[in-house]
Image (tube, helix red, strand yellow):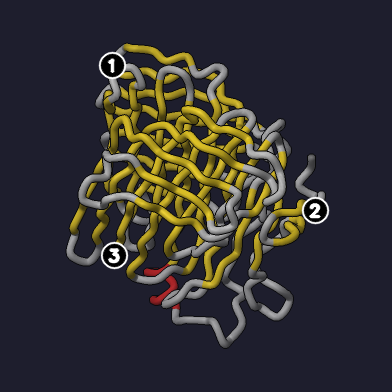
């Protein structure tokens, strides 16, 4: 199924993604779409929404997240340009030992250490460079393949390709933001991974692994919080969020089709996040239990900016369905993550 086709979901019809995030009158093209928005450029916002250059400098946030899931490990990494701060992280979680083998986390200089361009599909580019390590994710124009490279002084290295050629359509959502202006987020799942990752000489073969991409580019509020869940395999994947984007980015990929989901509910104890979670949507299309096996945590308080974050890694089990009247598809031990995150930036 191509992204140019309309797809019926519980929340309505998904239209093909527009070329840009703004309409002809300079207002955001709010909605959920199938396929990548070609360029995320907010410079043409109309006068009613325009802010000062200083406001835009500190409220314009961009990041690229990558998840790679397979039999032996889960890899998570991100490159973040938060306007007045730049950062990156990466980790490898060993599924047998149920622990993070090694993680990389670094701060950088905005505009120098980090670059996340305004494209999520053709021509996408995200890079972090610092004394402790480098990360880059590049998609060449006209290709379905992303090239991921990571080298750190701590002994974590990745050389991989992520092929979107047979993946289900990307979800692109353009969303109004309270105390901000608008956000564009693009979620891609079920990419085919190949290559390898190494942790202090121990090598993980990534052939046959499945990857997901999460690209965000928006004019966001100073205080932002969310709860998030993501998991994926070649046949089924999902993205759920409760927080600043509302239900707009909630999506199920099932046997190559993209299905919009309703509002997501996260039932868990924030003080005991390693206890089981329940995640479900109010349209009845997804109802899963999450069993955490380990977690990556990071809390930073830089006075002008702060981030309080935990990302448990584990497995989801339960059921999903494409429509309310369909027989459920059972999900068993689907590898993925949840997240509880609060940021002041």
Residue that extends furthest to the right in the rendered view of this protein: 5
Q: Is 25 above or below relative to 171?
A: below
Please, is residue 341 above or below residue 51 in the view?
above
Name the residue tied to disc 3. Answer: 344
- Residue 260: image quadrant is bottom right
Query: Where is 204 relative to 343, above or below?
Result: above
Of residues 50 and 205, the one drawn nearer to the viewer in this rendering: 205
Residue at image point 46% right, 18% down? 71
Query: Front-most of 207 and 127?
Result: 207
Which residue is drawn at the image coordinates 49% and 72% (left, top)? 177
Q: Measured from the top left, where is residue 152 in percent x and y? A: 31, 28
Please give left or right for residue 67 compared with residue 134 in the image.
Answer: right
Q: Which mark is residue 6?
A: 2
Q: Residues within 10 Å of mark 1 (few under 14, many from 20)?
A: few
Q: CA distance from mark 3 to mark 2?
A: 38 Å
**Mark 1 sits on what residue?**
200
> Residue shown at 51%/45% (left/top)?
287
Determine the secondary structure under disc 2. Answer: loop
Q: Which of the two labelled residues, at mark 1 and mark 2, occupies the earlier sequence position?
A: 2
Q: Secondary structure at mark 1?
A: loop
Percent coordinates x, y for residue 225 in the rendering: 36, 62
């Amino acid at each position: 199924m191509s992204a140019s086709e309309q797809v019926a979901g519980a929340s309505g019809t998904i239209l093909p993604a527009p070329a840009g995030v703004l309409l002809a009158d300079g207002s955001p093209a709010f909605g959920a779409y199938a396929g990548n928005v070609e360029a995320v450029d907010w410079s043409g916002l109309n006068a009613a929404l325009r802010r000062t250059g200083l406001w835009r400098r500190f409220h314009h946030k961009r990041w690229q997240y990558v998840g790679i899931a397979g039999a032996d490990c889960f890899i998570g990494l991100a490159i973040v340009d938060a306007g007045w701060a730049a950062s990156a992280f990466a980790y490898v979680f060993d599924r047998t030992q149920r622990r993070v083998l090694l993680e990389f986390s670094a701060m950088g200089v905005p505009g120098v250490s980090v670059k996340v361009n305004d494209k999520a599909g053709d021509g996408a580019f995200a890079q972090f460079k610092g004394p402790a390590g480098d990360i880059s994710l590049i998609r060449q124009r006209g290709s379905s393949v992303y090239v991921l490279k990571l080298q750190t002084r701590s002994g974590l290295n990745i050389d991989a390709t992520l092929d979107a050629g047979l993946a289900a359509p990307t979800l692109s959502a353009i969303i109004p933001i309270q105390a901000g202006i608008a956000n564009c987020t693009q979620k891609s799942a079920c990419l085919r991974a190949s290559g390898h990752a190494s942790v202090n000489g121990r090598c993980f073969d990534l052939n046959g692994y499945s990857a997901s991409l999460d690209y965000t580019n928006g004019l966001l509020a100073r205080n932002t919080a969310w709860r998030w869940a993501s998991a994926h395999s070649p046949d089924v994947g999902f993205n759920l969020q409760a927080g600043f984007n509302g239900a707009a980015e909630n999506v199920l990929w099932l046997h190559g089709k993209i299905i919009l989901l309703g509002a997501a509910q996260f039932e868990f104890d924030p003080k005991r996040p390693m206890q089981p979670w329940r995640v479900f949507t109010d349209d009845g299309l997804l109802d899963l239990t999450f069993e955490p096996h380990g977690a990556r945590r990071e809390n930073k308080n830089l006075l002008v900016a702060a981030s309080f974050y935990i990302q448990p890694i584990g497995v989801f089990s339960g059921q999903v369905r494409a429509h309310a009247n369909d027989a459920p598809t059972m999900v068993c031990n689907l590898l993925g993550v949840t997240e509880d995150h609060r940021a002041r930036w």
